[in-house]
Amino acid sequence: METIMQTLTRIAFATLVATAATASVAAAAQSGSTIQLRGTVAVNCSVSVTDLNQALNISGGETNKQVGTVTETCNRGNGYKITVGSANAGKLVSGAAGTSPIMYTTIYDGQSGNAGSLEILRSQAQFNKVSSVNVTIPASAQYIAGDYADTLTITIAAR
C-alpha cells in the first residue's frame, strides 16, 4: 500500500512532467523572423554668403579688410572643398581709360591666395561653420582714377 507521502510525491512528479511537456510543446510552436531597418542620408553641402558691402580704399591700400562672411555646411564625413573664384582672375578692373588691373590677395578663413585659384580643404563634416572673407590690396599713389571692381564666387563640393 502506498503512503500518503508516496502518493503526494507521485502526484507532484506527474504534475512536473506534464508542465515540462506543455512548456516544451509551447516552445516548439514559437517561430520568429527579423525586420531589417535601412535608410540613406544624402550628401548635403551648402554655403550661405553675406556680402558686407565694403568700400575699399584702393589708393591707400587695405590690409586684411573683411568684405564678407560665409556659413559652410557639409555632412560628408571625409570633408569638402571650398573654392573662391574671381570673375577677373584676382584683379580689380576698371573700364576707365588708361587703367590697369590691380591685383589683390584674398584671405578665406585665415588662408590666403589668389582668388583665381584659392581652395580650402576641410577634412571632416562641418555644420554652420562661419568663415570670414578678407582682402589685401597694395597701396599705390599711381593708380589711375576710375571705379574698380571684381566679383568673388564661393562654392562648396563634397570630397
Image (cartoon, rainbow, N blue to C red):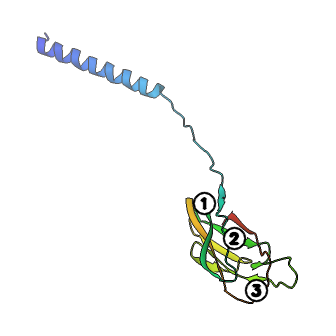
Query: What kind of element bears circle 2?
Result: strand
Q: Is residue 109 left or right of residue 100?
A: left
Residue 136 lies, in percent from the top left, at 64, 80
Q: Quadrant of the C terminus?
A: bottom right
Residue 25 lies, in percent from the top left, at 42, 23
**Would you call the spot at circle 3 few (<14 residues within 10 Å), some (14-19), or many (20 or more)?**
some
Where residue 26 sits, quadrant-wise, is top left
- Between residues 46 and 91, which one lies in front from this camera angle? 91
Residue 38 lies, in percent from the top left, at 60, 44
Residues under labels 3 and 1: Cα distance? 34 Å
Q: Residue at x 18, y 18 (%)?
A: 9
Residue type of the residue flagged with mark 3: Tyr
Query: Which of pointers 2 and 3 indicates the residue nearer the eye?
Result: 3
Q: Residue at x 47, y 27 (%)?
A: 30
- Between residues 68 and 159, which one lies in front from this camera angle? 68
Q: Quadrant of the N terminus?
A: top left
Residues under labels 2 and 1: Cα distance? 13 Å
| Residue 117 in sight here | yes
Q: Residue at x 59, y 78 (%)?
A: 64
Query: Which of pointers 2 and 1 indicates the residue nearer the eye?
Result: 1
Q: Which is nearer the N-term, disc 2 or disc 1?
A: 1
Residue type of the residue flagged with mark 1: Thr
- Between residues 141 and 138, which one lies in front from this camera angle? 141
Residue named by callout 2: 83
Q: Is residue 66 above or below residue 140?
A: above
**Would you call the spot at circle 1 few (<14 residues within 10 Å), some (14-19), or many (20 or more)?**
some
Residue named by callout 1: 71
- Label drawn at residue 143: 3
Where residue 123 sits, quadrant-wise, is bottom right
